[in-house]
Amino acid sequence: MKALFIPGNSPYPIFSHAPLATAVRNAGHQVLMGGIEWVLPNIASVGLAPVKISPVSMEEVSAFMGAMPEDPLDQLKAVGRVYAEIALDSLEPLLDLADHWRPDIVVGGGMFYTAPLLAHQLSIPSVRLEWDRIDARMYDPGAEPVLAPLLGELGLDRVPEPDLWLDVCPPSLRPADPVPARPVRWIPGNPQRPLESWMYTKGDRPRVYITAGTRLFSGDALRDMAKSIAGLGVEVVVGAPENVAAELRDELPDVRIGWVPLDVLAPTCDVIMHHGGGGTDMTALNAGVPQLVAHPEYPTEATRQITEFGAAILVESGGQDDITEACQKLLDDPSYRERAQILAQEFTELPPLGEIVAEMEKLVAARA
């Protein structure tokens, strides 16, 4: 079986799909992973073979993020529109790839419309693997006008549904109207580095990890959050790409700053503070660590689910004093960790990836 993974346009979708892609390869199948130019090093960093499907660069992604509308609904439409545009741009390179390396199945991420469209044109099955707990259907209104001309040419009135839809959300956090998907266990996937003992060792002080995700071009928010909790008597670890970490080290000499494999670090943390990103959220849930989501840049419905469950605190507005107070509350009240541990246990009870590989094999055999 030849499996083509095309997860999405930023590093996190790559990392979220890496465990399944690796499981498929370890079962003896051939795997390629496609991505825009910016994420090709990320694909290689998790040991998978990268294929460029679009020349979109980091600078272009940064410009798009900088021009993001302020209105939340307009943001959703803007993101859906750009994903649809990349889907259209990438179809021709992918069809060229298929002339030489024809996939038997395509696996795509939440709003990465490329996967089902390519699968339709090649008459092969497609799989949709959600990156995280965010319902990506909310981006569809922005994508539909962009995709409409191609859908008309293909005789379609909508983007085709996947043959297999995989949902990684733990049962207690599923919405009242969940997607019609098969549950599957989520496994952390991120690049590794030579470990230092502090990364996997619990220290004498409570540990707070702060990050703003992989798509980060400035360290201002990280610096402010680290300073805001400096007086709580905690050990602070800031996760950031090296270009951002370098500018922060002089300003925060007592803070560990740099790229840390979060799957290793998370179990040693008492609080994980972040911007609402799916990868950090899922890794914290998987490790059973309470979360502080401060000034999220994403829709907050998924965050409200964990706050209502009692495993996180959300600070949508306010200053650094509000963040400090929330962090202190998470450290002092053991109920947050108890609730987070319940969700971590639910992760372990979901079907393993090996079962999904077998289902993918069945889909290919049935289509053949």
Image (tube, helix red, strand yellow):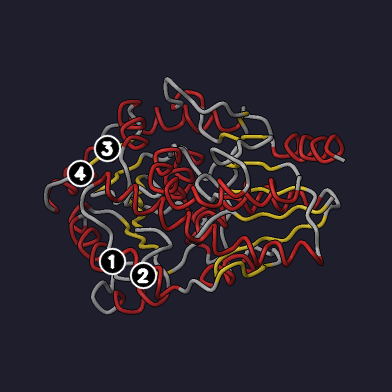
Q: Which residue is drawn at 42% across and 25% down?
A: 175
Which label number is shown at residue 66?
1
Residue 324 showing in the rendered view: yes
Amino acid tagged 4:
Glu
Whichever of callouts 2 and 4 sits on the residue coming sooner in the sequence is 2
Residue 33 location in percent, x, y?
67, 60
Closer to the camera, 148 or 98? 148
What separation in Å lies between label 2 and label 1 (alpha carbons)?
6 Å
* Numbered disc 4: secondary structure: loop
Residue 50 location in percent, x, y?
67, 67
Closer to the camera, 28 or 238? 28
* Numbered disc 3: secondary structure: strand
Closer to the camera, 334 or 189? 189
Amino acid tagged 1:
Gly
Q: Quick check: 172 above or below 246? A: above
Using residue 17 as the reference point, say whether residue 72 is left or right of it. Answer: left
Closer to the camera, 210 or 159? 159
Badge 4: how crowded within 10 Å, few (<14), some, or many (20+)? some
* Numbered disc 1: secondary structure: helix
Q: Name the residue under label 3.
A: 313
Q: Mark 2 points at which residue?
A: 62
Amino acid tagged 2:
Ser
**Quarter of the view holding residue 78:** bottom left
Q: Residue at x 16, y 43 (%)?
A: 325
Q: Name the residue under label 4.
A: 316
Residue 205 showing in the rendered view: no
Which tag is nearer the camera, tag 2 or tag 4? 2
Q: Quick check: 348 above or below 100? A: above
Mark 1 and mark 4 in contact (Cβ < 8 Å)? no
Which tag is nearer the camera, tag 4 or tag 3? 4
